Amino acid sequence: MKFFLFAVLLIVVAPTLVLCQSKQSDKAAKELMQIERDWVTASLKRDKAWLERFFADEFISTHPTSGTIKNKVREIADTIDETQTPDSMTLGEMKVIVAGKTAIVTGKAFETGGVHKLADRNRGYLFTDTFIKRGGRWQLLASHSSRLPEKDIIKIEK
């Protein structure tokens, strides 16, 4: 009899738990996509205070344009350097995977202008960003981007 009650309880409760988990993941996914958009805004405005809160202290990134691996300090310094700030940036479609307090966001990013050392004025990237939730907020722990072929780059109209 106890087994029967347990089985009935499991059948009733399990779908509710899955539904709640799904809603939490959907909420986190929307929040993370907004954070990605906020990062674009903060980068264009060279908002150092926002960037310092956004990047985890252990942050590491790989960049296809500079061919370097950067830490938090270098990433912020390069982002607020007006000679490297793009004239415009936009994000394409993004996908989010949430696993507890860790999340991965993949997508496409497009930029034009800036980065004075580059000959190509319009650039596109595939990116993978890894976030961790600490103290109730998401921080970027790692970022990797790869250049898109020229045929896949969307030109941004200002």
Image (cartoon, rainbow, N blue to C red):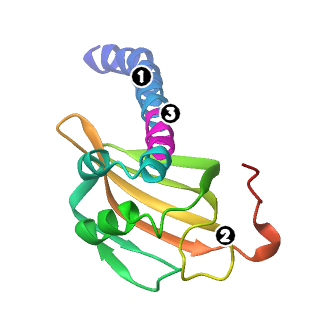
Q: Is residue 82 visible?
A: yes
Mark-to-mark CA distance, 1 and 3: 16 Å
Specify which label sits upstream in the sequence, 2 or 3: 3
Specify which label sits upstream in the sequence, 1 or 2: 1
**Residue 13 location in percent, x, y?**
38, 17
Specify which label sits upstream in the sequence, 1 or 3: 1
Quadrant occupied by the N terminus: top left
- In this rendering, which labeled residue sits more in front, label 2 or label 3? 2
The residue beneath circle 1 is 20
- In this rendering, which labeled residue sits more in front, label 1 or label 3? 3
Mark-to-mark CA distance, 2 and 3: 26 Å
Which of the labelled discs sits on residue 30, or is there none? 3
Q: Disc 2 vs disc 3: Cβ atoms closer than 8 Å?
A: no
The stretch drawn in magenta includes residue 107: no
**Residue type pointed to by label 2:** Arg
Furthest toward the bottom, the residue is 67
Could you tell me what secondary structure mostly forms the magenta stretch?
Answer: helix
The residue beneath circle 2 is 123
Q: Is residue 101 visible?
A: no
**Residue type pointed to by label 3:** Lys
Q: Quadrant of residue 88?
A: bottom right
Q: Which residues are magenta?
A: 31-38
**Residue 12 location in percent, x, y?**
43, 14
